[in-house]
Image (spheres, rainbow, N blue to C red):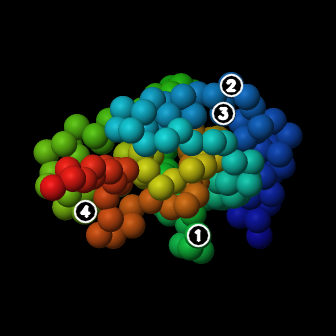
Amino acid sequence: MMFGALASAALAASATGSAVSDAQFQNAVLGVHNRERAAVSSPPLRWSADLARDAARWADWLAAAGMLQHDGANRSEGENLWMGTRGAYRVEEMVAGWANEKALLRRLRSWQDNYHRVGHYTQMIWSGTTAVGCALSKGRSFEVLVCRYDPPGNVWNQSPYRARAVVASGR
């Protein structure tokens, strides 16, 4: 089966030199995420090697298949996907693409009003999310970035922002 061979080759390549374990890659991903989170008072994320491994498996599959779609078997982790021309973007630019969705979010009453266009950003800043792990995989002419989040954000009828504490006035 040709796809199986491609997937195996992609997995082997990522296992030997993947950005999953690269400190610069991790710092770039966390840097963009945590700047965006700080701007809306969400606590910083920590890097998860387990999430990065899950992300690598899916990124490798997508790169081998030459497509971009969410992992239908993933039921427990949040997920952001990015695809672009191979070698044309820095990791910070890839992640910043999701962050740029905040401009549209500001014009919406709720993130749910257009979640397909702002859901990457809301997952990034979701206040209850504590960990992220990402992987970058290369296809013939494109790259795929997959980030996984725990716990997942974008929970329907909830806000991505930290609940503000209400101080009793004593009356």
Image disc number at residue 26: 3
Q: Amino acid at mark 3?
A: Gln
Q: Amino acid at mark 1?
A: Ser
Q: CA distance from mark 3 to mark 2?
A: 5 Å
Secondary element under disc 3, as helix, strand or loop, is helix
Please say if 150 is above or below 39: below
Image disc number at residue 76: 1
Q: CA distance from mark 1 to mark 4?
A: 20 Å
Is residue 64 at least partly visible in the picture? no
Q: Amino acid at mark 2?
A: Gln
Q: CA distance from mark 4 to mark 3?
A: 29 Å
Say whether residue 73 is left or right of residue 9: left
| Residue 128 location (% of width, % of height) | 48, 55
* Mark 1 Cα shell of 10 Å, populated few (<14), some (14-19), many (≥20): few
| Residue 81 location (% of width, % of height) | 49, 50
| Residue 61 location (% of width, % of height) | 66, 58
Residue nearest the observer in this picture, 57 or 112:
112
Q: Earlier in the sequence, mark 2 or mark 1?
A: 2
Image disc number at residue 112: 4
Q: Earlier in the sequence, mark 4 or mark 3?
A: 3
Is residue 58 at least partly visible in the picture? yes
Q: Are marks 1 and 3 in contact (CB under 8 Å)?
A: no
Circle 2 is placed at which residue position? Answer: 24
Secondary element under disc 2, as helix, strand or loop, is helix
* Picture residue at 77% right of the left edge, 70% below the top: 1
Snapshot quadrant of residue 6: bottom right
* Picture residue at 37% right of the left edge, 46% below the top: 121
